[in-house]
Image (tube, helix red, strand yellow):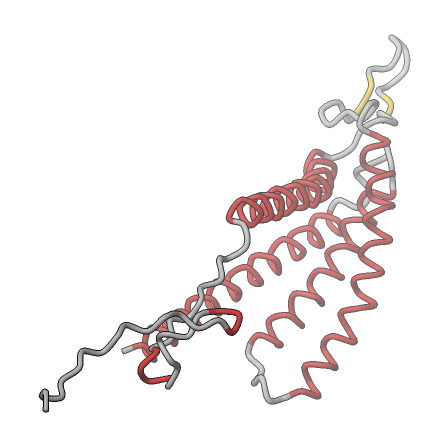
């Protein structure tokens, strides 16, 4: 019975991990599609669609490697190490684009406009493109992807602080002194600590008088 419970737990954890990786694969695909199709629709900062494309490609490759690793056998050490070696440079490249994305997205927040694509011209002139315009799908998707990283980091810090707090409150486990059976250990019950002997009770004289 214990075996089946353990196997069910492992299967549940594996299924949850697979679902998380699938969701993590869908978001970069969506970002890549938006970045390509709306590439010329963010004159407020032309680098934001580039950020979506770069993060989308990196996320697709990284999530695909994670799914592949999920279905590998634990004994296949060579492939496991190969996947880890591929994910390390991907993580570094992602971090670089994450820093750049913070500059591009948050730096445009104060002036970006997601509604007015064209500005009204003068009475004689036609409408002109709005230099502060950015397609709402492009801008808010990039904003969401960057902000979610900070939200996840904050949640992880809260969980770690909570675990550390409860562990510190529980305190060290008390050591229990094993009870030794004096009769089975062969020790003299009338021998006290520190080598001092306790007086033994006098035995009654059972010999008959002569």
User: At 10% across and 87% down in the image, what residue appears?
Assistant: 209
- Quadrant housing residue 67: bottom right
User: At 74% across and 81% down in the image, what residue appears?
Assistant: 82
Q: Quadrant of the C terminus?
A: bottom left
Residue nearer the viewer, 65 or 119: 65
- Quadrant housing residue 71: bottom right
Query: Residue 54 vs residue 155: left or right?
Result: right
Give x and y (percent) for residue 198.
Answer: 40, 70
Relative to 210, does residue 119 appear above or below in the rendering? above
Give x and y (percent) for residue 189.
Answer: 35, 75
Give x and y (percent) for residue 113.
Answer: 77, 25
Relative to 39, does residue 175 appear above or below in the rendering? below
User: At 87% across and 38% down in the image, what residue appears?
Assistant: 103
Total number of numbered discs in the rendering: 0
Residue nearer the viewer, 160 or 117: 160
Query: Residue 187 vs residue 207: left or right?
Result: right
Extreme bottom residue here?
210
Relative to 160, does residue 42 appear above or below in the rendering? above
Give x and y (percent) for residue 26.
Answer: 60, 57
- Quadrant housing residue 44: top right
Extreme top residue here?
123
Q: Quadrant of the N terminus?
A: bottom left
Query: Residue 169 vs residue 154: left or right?
Result: left
User: At 62% across and 60% down in the image, what residue appears?
Assistant: 25
């Amino acid at each position: 019975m214990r075996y089946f419970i353990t196997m069910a737990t492992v299967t549940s954890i594996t299924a949850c991990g697979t679902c998380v990786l699938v969701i993590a694969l869908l978001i970069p695909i969506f970002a890549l599609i938006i970045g390509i199709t709306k590439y010329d629709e963010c004159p407020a900062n032309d680098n934001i669609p580039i950020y979506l494309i770069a993060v989308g490609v990196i996320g697709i490759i990284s999530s695909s490697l994670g799914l592949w690793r999920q279905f590998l056998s634990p004994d296949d050490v060579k492939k496991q190490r190969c996947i880890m070696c591929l994910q390390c440079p991907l993580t570094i490249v992602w971090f670089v684009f994450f820093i750049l994305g913070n500059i591009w997205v948050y730096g445009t927040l104060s002036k970006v406009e997601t509604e007015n694509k064209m500005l009204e011209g003068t009475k004689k002139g036609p409408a002109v493109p709005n230099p502060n315009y950015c397609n709402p799908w492009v801008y808010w998707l990039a904003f969401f992807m960057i902000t979610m990283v900070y939200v996840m980091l904050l949640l992880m810090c809260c969980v770690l602080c909570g675990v550390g707090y409860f562990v510190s409150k529980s305190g060290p486990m008390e050591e229990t002194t094993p009870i030794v059976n004096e009769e089975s250990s062969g020790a003299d019950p009338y021998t006290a600590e520190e080598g001092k002997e306790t007086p033994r009770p006098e035995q009654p004289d059972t010999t008959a008088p002569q």
